[in-house]
Image (cartoon, rainbow, N blue to C red):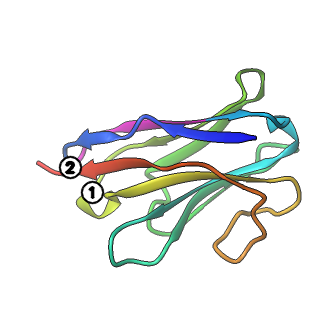
Amino acid sequence: VQLQASGGGLVQPGGSLRLSCTASGFPLLDYAIGWFRQAPGRKREEVASISVSDGTSIYGSSVKGRVTISRDNAKKTVYLEMKNMKPEDSAIYYCVADPVSFPLTTDARIAYWGRGTQVTVSS
């Protein structure tokens, strides 16, 4: 069982980035998927999550309107597209999965965690 986040990097303020989360070893289409982030010295924060059934998406207040989560079950991949990025978006971004919980918040039961990908927003 593996969740692998990728696509992180350095982006300028106001820029865009797309993160990918690829699953292996379990049926992605049966799991809600979420993205969390954590910056040094700050609490872990939920960014977005997408449901199993109808693709309902929920966003954290700090990113609402600037990010879009989507899923491609055939490719076993979930995407997080971020735009108009700010320095405070800098963090390690993790993708997570659970077959029952939704939305995937910091208090939710989370079955699987992936390794993170670093995002840095700086000029």
Task: Give percent across and percent down for residue 93.
Answer: 47, 53
Count neighbours of disc 1 (C-alpha within 10 A) and say few if under 14, some if 14 to 19, many if 20 or more.
some
In-front residue for pair 65/78: 78
12 is higher (above) or lower (below) than 38: above
Task: Give percent across and percent down for residue 65.
Answer: 47, 54
Question: Residue at label 2?
Answer: 13
Count neighbours of disc 2 (C-alpha within 10 A) and say few if under 14, some if 14 to 19, many if 20 or more.
some
Magenta-drawn stretch contains 20: yes
Q: Quadrant of the N terminus?
A: top right
Q: Is residue 53 left or right of residue 9?
A: right
Nearer-N-terminus badge (1/2): 2
Q: Which mark is residue 60?
A: none
Assess whether mark 2 and mark 1 are in contact (beta carbons under 8 angstroms): yes
- Amino acid carrying label 1: it is Lys
In-front residue for pair 48/108: 108
Please, which residue is most extreme toward the front here? 1
Residue at screen point 43% across, 51% down: 66
In-front residue for pair 57/41: 41
78 is higher (above) or lower (below) than 42: above
Residue at screen point 67% across, 69% down: 105
What's the CA distance linking mark 1 and mark 2?
A: 5 Å
Task: Give percent across and percent down for residue 81.
Answer: 48, 40
Identify the element where label 1 is drawn. loop
- The residue stretch that appears in magenta: 13-21
What is the quadrant of residue 74 in the picture? Answer: top right
Q: Is residue 67 left or right of residue 1?
A: left
Identify the element where label 2 is drawn. loop
- Amino acid carrying label 2: it is Pro
What is the quadrant of residue 82 in the picture? Answer: top left
Question: Residue at label 1?
Answer: 86
Task: Give percent across and percent down for residue 39.
Answer: 36, 67
Magenta-drawn stretch contains 48: no
